[in-house]
Image (cartoon, rainbow, N blue to C red):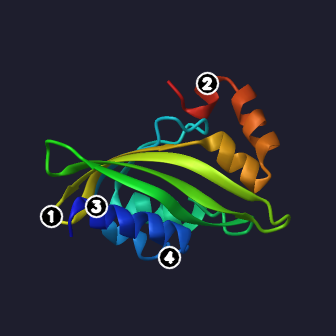
Amino acid sequence: MTPEEVFLRLVHGVADRDFDALPALYAEQTDVRHPMSPYGEPPLLTRDALREHFSGRGPRVGEAVRFTPDAIRVHQTQDPEVIVAEFDYAGTVIATGESFKVPCIFVLRVRDGEIVESRDYVDHVAMARARGRLDELVAVLREPAAARGAS
């Protein structure tokens, strides 16, 4: 698979909540980071760590919202392994029917059809607002950076 094909499987898999299939998109040894996350998440460095991320504490947003990737723009780089993908997760809040958009940018390095490196930039405020979790986000932001694992 090309980097763009892997990216499309990833974002559609997240939207479809096909979390069991997602770890196979990553190499055994990988480096996935969420640099803008206020939650102090550690890097995900193995496929097993991604499996845990997607099975438990990962993007389990289906209880509050339904969404699909939208306005996808994939930019090729001079490095054939690297793409920059801009997109929105566009959806609906289940409880209210309110629509939302969460802007995202992913920078992926894909080698032999597997993600070996990813930097995922997500608008965490927009996602917390859509999920009805702004108070939780504010509480996290009030914690000292060291308590969140931030540096």
Of badges 4 and 2, nearer the viewer stands 4
User: Residue 18: percent from the left, percent from the top?
Assistant: 50, 76
Query: Reading the chain from its start, which is encountered first: label 4 or label 2?
Result: 4
- For badge 4, the amino acid type reads Asp
- The residue pinned by badge 3 equals 4
Res 5 quadrant in image = bottom left
- The residue pinned by badge 4 equals 18
Say left or right for 66 vs 94: left
Q: From this view, report whether residue 64 is shown above or below residue 150.
A: below
- The residue pinned by badge 2 equals 145
Secondary structure at badge 2 equals: helix
Do labels 2 and 3 touch, CB within 8 Å? no
Q: From this view, report whether residue 102 is shown above or below residue 54.
A: above
**Badge 1: residue crowd in 10 Å (few <14, some 14–19, many ≥20):** few
What label sits on residue 28 in the rendered view? none
- For badge 1, the amino acid type reads Asp
Alpha carbons under labels 1 and 2: distance apart? 37 Å
Residue 121 seen in the figure:
yes
Query: Reading the chain from its start, which is encountered first: label 3 or label 4?
Result: 3
Of badges 3 and 1, nearer the viewer stands 3
Say left or right for 95 vs 34: right
Query: Reading the chain from its start, which is encountered first: label 1 or label 4?
Result: 4
Do labels 1 and 2 touch, CB within 8 Å? no
- For badge 2, the amino acid type reads Ala
The N terminus lies in quadrant: bottom left
Alpha carbons under labels 2 and 3: distance apart? 35 Å
User: Residue 98: percent from the left, percent from the top?
Assistant: 79, 60
**Badge 3: residue crowd in 10 Å (few <14, some 14–19, many ≥20):** many
Query: Reading the chain from its start, which is encountered first: label 2 or label 3?
Result: 3
Do labels 1 and 4 touch, CB within 8 Å? no
- The residue pinned by badge 1 equals 112
